[in-house]
Amino acid sequence: MKFFTVEWAKSELSDEECERRPDEYQAHLASLKGKLSSSLHYLAHKINLHDGLIQSIVADSASRELFLELVCGDLSVGYSDIKLHYCGVEWSVVDWQLLKDLANNPKSEALYDEVHLAPGSTFEHRILFWPYSSITIQFSEASVCSTPRTDPSDRSLQPLENRFSSKP
């Protein structure tokens, strides 16, 4: 994470620095204008992953795809199912064990996320989770689907034996 670091999330920076980070991130996003597809623009500007619970993570090595499903929102705006589909994933950047640990920890929650331009005309989606750890997903393209829940106060996860799965 570059802007929304663990230190920022814990308010361990000066008040001035904590207040400056969101503005710096917005300036960063403005610098990416014209470089983000409509899906990435939507992810960076419209989707709020804060307090997102992990429904599932599916990694498909052969097709270089990663699917991340979260339940995001709060009682004031209602909850939604967020489905992120990353294509052209660079597997060497992915921390597999951390992904598995986060997916299978029912207390894991997404706190903040950032979209970045990565070397080689690829992108990065960085997500800070609680307990404090972050993942970086490097990819060539992504799609996002947000579906409001029928019961907007329902934050429950579907019962799954394993929230992380991978296909060779």
Image (tube, grey):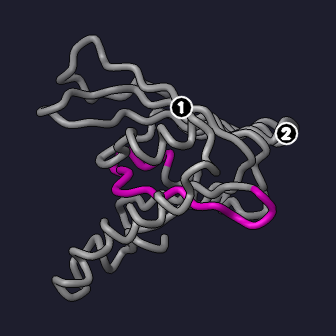
Q: Is residue 166 left or right of residue 133?
A: right
Tell whether label 2 touches label 1 (CB within 8 Å).
Answer: no
Q: Is residue 161 visible?
A: no
Residue type (three-letter) at the residue carrying disc 1: Val
Label 1 environment density (alpha carbons within 10 Å; few <14, some 14–19, many ≥20): some
Looking at the rendering, which quadrant does residue 58 occupy?
A: top right
**In the figure, 155 relative to 16: above or below?**
above
Residue drawn at x 62%, y 58% is: 124
Q: Is residue 72 left or right of residue 90?
A: left
- Which residue does the numbered mark 1 point to in the structure image? 144
Q: Which of the marked residues, 1 or 2, is nearer the chain's N terminus?
A: 1
Three-letter residue code for mark 2: Pro
- Near-viewer residue (39 or 75): 39
Q: Residue at x 80, y 42 (%)?
A: 64
Q: x, y (%) of residue 115?
A: 53, 56
Q: Residue furthest front?
A: 34
Task: Tell me if residue 74 comes above or below residue 35 in the rendering.
Answer: above
Range of magenta residues: 103-121
